[in-house]
């Protein structure tokens, strides 16, 4: 029996590796794509312990490297079908908008936006030919609401949201569904590096940074497995919606922003922070 095939980018850890395991448990053939195969050793060990190794193929893929993407695309011809693409690869640049160097903004967009677009372009022809498929883009709660000290990351996720909306409308006639998954705070490398920013002692944003750290220090981080399970459930749907917020209280936060004036919303977020 032909198995459905799913690609997971950024599969070496966090939401990516949790998704690989969950999809393999569901009986899918999974292509675990990552830019450093050595970082996938822990995932390989987990798959062996679960006796799922036969369902997962590890492939090298740097989403910021055109040659790497083209090499990866050639390997996809070895599969009977490409049914699901999960664009999970991402990086996080922390810092206040004024203090983040332009090179860092470009690095942020190279992976989170341009890399996602490039991989998607490589996979679409396979799905069009087979007349169906699902493209699941891992966005974030910050793709629908911004927070201070995250300007580069927030901008990249807003871009992913807009791209995904347009892409969904373009691919619907080919029976290809485009879906956004919007996780809140989960225990991943990105969230753990949230405040890894170069804010000097003479920075005008220093007190703001300290407030941010205080506000988030007691944050309860979710298990990435929750996001993986949501992705698995979406794959099973015949007509998935566009957006799926994931995490405790996330939908309530989104609703609160929609129902609150901007002035009240910013007071809630920054209070009496120094201007």
Image (cartoon, rainbow, N blue to C red):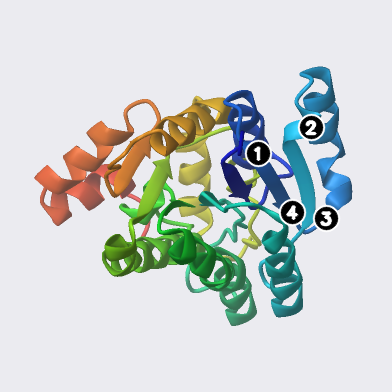
Which label's residue is closer to the chain start, 3 or 2?
3
Residue 259 vertical placement versus 128 (above, below): above
Circles 3 and 1, Cβ within 8 Å, touching? The answer is no
Q: Residue at x 48, y 57 (%)?
A: 149
> Left or right: where does residue 94 sit relative to residue 142?
right
Which label's residue is closer to the chain start, 4 or 2?
4
Residue 112 figure quarter: bottom right
Residue 222 vertical placement versus 259 (above, below): above
- Front label number (3 vs 1): 1
**Relative image position of residue 166 (x, y in whole percent):** 30, 69
Measure how far apart labels 1 and 4 are at the Cα level.
Answer: 16 Å
Measure how far apart labels 3 and 4 are at the Cα level.
Answer: 6 Å
Circles 1 and 4, Cβ within 8 Å, touching? The answer is no
Check disc 3 and report its element: helix, strand or loop.
loop
Which label's residue is closer to the chain start, 3 or 1?
1
> Left or right: where does residue 220 sit relative to residue 247?
right
Q: Nearer the viewer, residue 227 or 78?
A: 78
Q: Quadrant of the N terminus?
A: top right
Q: Which residue is the site of mark 2? A: 54
Measure how far apart labels 1 and 2 are at the Cα level.
Answer: 8 Å
Circles 3 and 4, Cβ within 8 Å, touching? The answer is yes
| Dot 2 crowding, Cα within 10 Å, few <14, some 14–19, many 20+ | few
Which label's residue is closer to the chain start, 1 or 2?
1
Q: Which residue is the site of mark 4? A: 34
Measure how far apart labels 3 and 2 are at the Cα level.
Answer: 20 Å
Check disc 2 and report its element: helix, strand or loop.
helix
Check disc 4 and report its element: helix, strand or loop.
strand
> Left or right: where does residue 3 sit relative to residue 230?
right
Whether residue 118 is visible? yes
């Amino acid at each position: 029996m032909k198995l459905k095939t799913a690609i997971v980018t950024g599969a070496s850890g966090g939401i990516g590796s949790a998704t690989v395991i969950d999809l393999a448990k569901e009986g899918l053939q999974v292509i675990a794509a990552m830019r450093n195969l050595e970082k996938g050793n822990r995932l390989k060990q987990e798959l062996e312990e679960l006796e799922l190794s036969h369902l997962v193929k590890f492939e090298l893929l740097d989403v910021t490297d055109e040659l790497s993407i083209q090499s990866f695309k050639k390997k996809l011809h070895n599969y009977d079908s490409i049914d699901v693409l999960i664009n999970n690869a991402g990086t996080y640049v922390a810092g206040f908008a004024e203090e983040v160097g332009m090179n860092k903004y470009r690095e942020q967009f190279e992976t989170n936006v341009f890399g996602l677009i490039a991989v998607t372009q490589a996979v679409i022809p396979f799905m069009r030919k087979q007349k169906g498929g699902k493209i699941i883009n891992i966005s974030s709660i910050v793709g629908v609401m911004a927070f201070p000290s995250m300007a580069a990351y927030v901008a990249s996720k807003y871009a992913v949201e807009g791209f995904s909306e347009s892409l969904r409308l373009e691919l619907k006639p080919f029976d290809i569904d485009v879906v956004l998954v919007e996780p809140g705070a989960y225990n991943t490398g990105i969230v753990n590096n949230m405040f890894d920013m170069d804010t000097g002692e003479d920075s005008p944003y220093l007190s703001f940074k300290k407030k941010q750290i205080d506000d988030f220090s007691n944050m309860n981080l979710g298990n990435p497995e929750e996001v993986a399970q949501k992705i698995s459930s979406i794959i099973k749907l015949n007509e998935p919606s566009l957006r799926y917020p994931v995490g405790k209280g996330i939908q309530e936060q989104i609703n609160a922003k929609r129902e609150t004036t901007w002035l009240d919303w910013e007071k809630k977020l920054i209070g009496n922070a120094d201007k």
